[in-house]
Amino acid sequence: MKAEYAITISKGISDIASKEVYNITGVYPEAGDNILYISLDIEKVYELILWGRTIYKVIHILDKGIFQDLDDLANKIEKIDLKLFGCNGSFALRTSRYGSHNFTSLDANKVVGASIYRSLVRAGYNVNVDLNNPDVEYVLRIINDEYLFGINIVGESLHIRRYRVYNHPASIKTSLAAALIYISGYKGEIFIDPMAGGGTIPIEAALIKHRIAPGLYRENHSLIKIPYYDTELYLRKREEAEGRRIDKMFGEPIIYNDISPRYMRGAMRNAESAGVDRYITFLSYDARELSEYISGLDGGIAVFNPPYGIRMTRKAVIYDLYRDVISELKLLGIKRIVAITSEARIFKDALEENDFRIGCRYVVLHGKLTTHIICGEI
């Protein structure tokens, strides 16, 4: 039994996320700006929400189409049979709206939310509204005169892995960290993050290398509350994912480095929480002086999230830092570099000064900041 789904992602990585979704499900999605659309059977949906690393939320689409005004939209939503898509308890409606309308998102939440309430009561459910911690979350996307209405089947965004017990002040989202690793083409060779902060990038690399499904870090996904979904099959898929884990040391090292011992201790806590601390080598050196302490990284990959934006204010300082770190990586034998920064031109110049060829480039939204993913190869 197939259904239609919308998958939310970071803006700018649709091709990376699409490829991951295809690798998990065998179905290539249709890509939008920060959303993917796909038709899947239930079994593949379970695998997607357990194994997806670059995606945020998965929305089971219940209705979509054209509407005339807010009352027309509310009437369309109220006609949907929610017998298989509700539960006793609380619900919330999250509305996103793009375009010009004679109503606000708050108006839509209020009017359409009332329609959902009546539909759920008609389906026999005893419900109340809870905007903070609902049992079921409905999603309404309005773009000009088109709408998409569905139910969130994962709960909180999948980029929240729940292994993070230490929060670095400039941490990267796990989903973007995974995208950087995919872009690097990592296949188990030597891997280093020379400015690793809270450890997200090396931890995500360890999850990929050791076939650890990120969805297993949460006790369950919210679809277990939705009658349409088979809880027993979902639990079997979780067991299968557990069985695919490679729980042993093998291959080349994954190296964490950061100049701050305090950040390193925090990263070690995160790695321990994720169960991958023994798969990562932890160092605390100045990234501009790494060759004084380590060697033997020939043919390796460096993936990192260097300081930029409000973390660094003087352009000359940023350039010197980027140039010197890249020079050290080259000296150590690193052949491929992937980094995310808002200072794209400066990082590109620093790569080229060190004889790295510029490869792929992506423009992505990291929080509210427009950033660039840049690849260099030698």
Image (tube, rainbow, N blue to C red):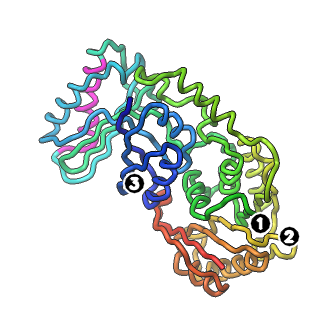
User: Label 2 is placed on what type of residue?
Assistant: Ile
- Secondary structure, mark 3, is loop
User: Label 1 is placed on what type of residue?
Assistant: Ile
Q: Position of residue 327 (x, y in %)?
A: 72, 81
Disc marking residue 34: 3
Image quadrant holding the N terminus, namely top left
Q: Is residue 282 left or right of residue 101?
A: right
Image quadrant holding the C terminus, namely bottom right
Examine the image and state in which quarter residue 148 appears.
Answer: top left
User: Real-space Cα distance between discs 3 and 1?
Assistant: 35 Å
**Is 104 contained in the magenta span?**
yes
- Secondary structure, mark 2, is loop
**Reading the chain from its start, which is encountered first: label 3 or label 1?**
3
| Residue that numbered label 1 is attached to | 259
* Local crowd size for mark 2, using a 10 Å CA cut-off: few (<14), some (14–19), many (≥20): few
Q: Position of residue 23 (x, y in %)?
A: 52, 49
**Which residue sits at x=61%, y=30%?**
238
**Which residue sits at x=79%, y=50%?**
279
In the rendered structure, which segment of residues is drawn in magenta?
Answer: 103-120
360 or 372, nearer to the observer: 360
Residue 252 versus residue 294 in the image, above or below: above
Residue 162 versus residue 190 in the image, above or below: above
Q: Is residue 214 left or right of residue 40?
A: right
| Residue that numbered label 2 is attached to | 294
